[in-house]
Image (cartoon, helix red, strand yellow):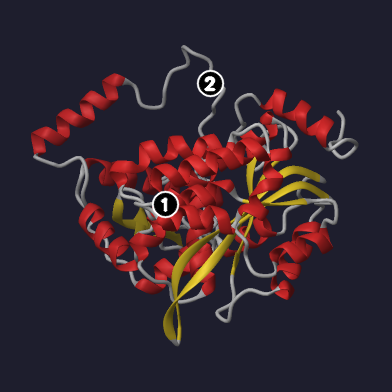
């Protein structure tokens, strides 16, 4: 990416300070553009012309500072260096491509900083490409969008180079330090198509943790092997998370992935492995007609909100009586997974509420599926992780890794976690 420095807007500018462009100047520019029939956007639009004029004026001031005298100043005579015309340069900016006249000196010692030698685009233009890429647009879509909006034709290689600039950021994010304790960690899978010789569905696993302040964080993402998961794969993944500082997890919610429970018991021996209630509900609805979802969800709720195992069993019997004939696969699903589900009923109600809330996983998955659906398939694992990372970074609730988004009623849940998992939740 270009290393051009852009002067940031001062967020602390007191009210009443004169803005850089006041209403009078803006009116004059718009009136002049209308009089000449110029558009606001486009290669010859008002914004392009203003950008060109400001950059060329700034480059001229840079050259003046380098030479030590103003243009046409007699003080420059005999100075040993002077202005020597300009070099044409095409620069890609957020408002489109503009043709710059970059001033030069006779000795060839002038090295501009606002638009550096060899630079063909401003940082803002790179950010625009990354923003489009993060929304799941393909390289072809991005090229078409830039051509339509800014009359700029960029190569696929340029888009790849710009987006590859986030790979270092992705690596830092994947290795960033984590908290020592997470009360709950969800492990979920998202299926994407990756081309590795042939196009195949590959799982991308997300670990989402809720910290002791109730804030939710995406801890990491890993592409599963094409040959299927094993205890060795999960041991490597969880050991990586542990090496980043996670010494203990109270509850790990997962979906019965092969080898995962065994790996959890090795890495965090005190952790409770809980079948993810969200996945169980989602799997149940997959068998049912949408028109029955509301009534079915209400009956399922009597099971996972039951006060104990006996009450949950009564709810399961009622479910079978009500829906068994129409949806026998749903009843069979719950009976098959009953041993992995039952430990959930021992948790206090406030702990249960954190574990079975559907908003967390569903909201993330919906947004990530959108960007992967737009792309269709990815040329490599790295390309898939790059798009998913940008999508996670763009989620409002995950923009700041140190903030996340907090559960409502977390204080009550924290008290329940502290009592139920005595001695494992750190005190302030």
> What's the CA distance linking mark 2 and mark 1?
28 Å
Query: Camera-side residue: 70 or 271?
Result: 271
140 over 51 or under it: above or below:
below
Are dots 2 and 1 in contact, CB under 8 Å?
no
Query: Camera-side residue: 341 or 211?
Result: 341
x, y percent for residue 307: 66, 31
Q: Which mark is residue 396?
A: none
Disc 2 crowd rating (10 Å Cα; few below 14, some 14-19, many 20+) is: few
Q: Residue at x 40, y 66 (%)?
A: 159
x, y percent for residue 224: 59, 71
357 over 140 or under it: above or below:
above
Disc 1 crowd rating (10 Å Cα; few below 14, some 14-19, many 20+) is: some
Q: Residue at x 79, y 51 (%)?
A: 271
Q: Which residue is mark 2?
A: 13
As drawn, is 193 to the left or to the right of 148?
right
x, y percent for residue 317: 52, 43
Q: Which mark is residue 131?
A: 1
389 over 195 or under it: above or below:
above
Q: Quadrant of residue 152?
A: bottom left
Is residue 374 something one can see in this rendering? yes
x, y percent for residue 375: 36, 65
The tag earlier along the polypeptide, 2 or 1, is 2
Query: Camera-side residue: 107 or 89?
Result: 89
As drawn, is 60 to the left or to the right of 224?
left
Q: Residue at x 85, y 51 (%)?
A: 270
Q: Residue at x 53, y 73 (%)?
A: 381
Q: Quadrant of residue 357?
A: top right
């Amino acid at each position: 990416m270009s290393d051009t420095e852009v002067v940031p807007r001062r967020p602390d500018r007191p009210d009443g300070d004169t803005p850089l462009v006041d209403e009078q100047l803006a009116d004059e520019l718009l009136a002049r553009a209308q009089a000449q029939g110029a558009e606001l956007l486009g290669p010859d639009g008002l914004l392009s012309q203003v950008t060109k004029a400001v950059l060329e004026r700034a480059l001229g001031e840079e050259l003046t500072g380098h030479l030590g005298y103003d243009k046409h100043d007699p003080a420059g005579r005999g100075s040993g260096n002077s202005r020597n015309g300009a070099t044409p340069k095409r620069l890609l900016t957020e408002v489109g491509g503009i043709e710059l006249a970059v001033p030069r000196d006779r000795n060839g010692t002038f090295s501009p900083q606002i638009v550096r030698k060899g630079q063909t685009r401003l940082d803002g233009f790179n950010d625009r490409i990354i923003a489009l890429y993060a929304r799941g647009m393909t390289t072809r879509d991005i090229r078409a969008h830039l051509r339509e909006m800014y009359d700029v034709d960029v190569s696929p290689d340029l888009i790849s180079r710009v987006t590859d600039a986030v790979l270092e950021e992705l690596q830092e994010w994947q290795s960033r330090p984590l908290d020592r304790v997470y009360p709950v960690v969800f492990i979920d899978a998202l299926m994407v198509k990756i081309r590795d010789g042939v196009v195949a569905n590959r799982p991308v696993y997300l670990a989402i943790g809720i910290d002791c302040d109730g804030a939710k964080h995406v801890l990491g993402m890993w592409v599963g092997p094409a040959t299927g998961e094993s205890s060795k794969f999960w041991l490597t993944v969880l050991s990586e998370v542990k090496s980043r500082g996670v010494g203990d997890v109270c509850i790990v919610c997962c979906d019965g992935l092969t080898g995962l429970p065994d790996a959890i018991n090795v890495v965090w021996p005190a952790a409770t492995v809980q079948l993810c209630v969200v996945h169980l509900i989602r799997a149940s609805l997959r068998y049912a007609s949408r028109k029955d979802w509301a009534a079915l969800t209400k009956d399922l709720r009597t099971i996972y909100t039951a006060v104990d195992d006996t009450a949950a069993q009564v709810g399961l019997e009622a479910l079978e009586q009500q829906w068994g004939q129409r949806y026998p696969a749903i009843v069979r699903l719950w009976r098959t997974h009953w041993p992995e589900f039952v430990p959930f009923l021992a948790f206090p109600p406030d702990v249960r509420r954190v574990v079975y809330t559907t908003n967390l996983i569903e909201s993330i998955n919906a947004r990530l599926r959108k960007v992967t659906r737009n792309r269709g398939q990815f040329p490599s694992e790295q390309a898939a992780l790059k798009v998913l990372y940008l999508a996670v970074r763009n989620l409002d609730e995950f923009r700041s890794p140190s903030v996340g988004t907090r559960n409502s009623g977390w204080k009550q849940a924290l008290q329940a976690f502290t009592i139920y998992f005595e001695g494992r939740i750190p005190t302030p």
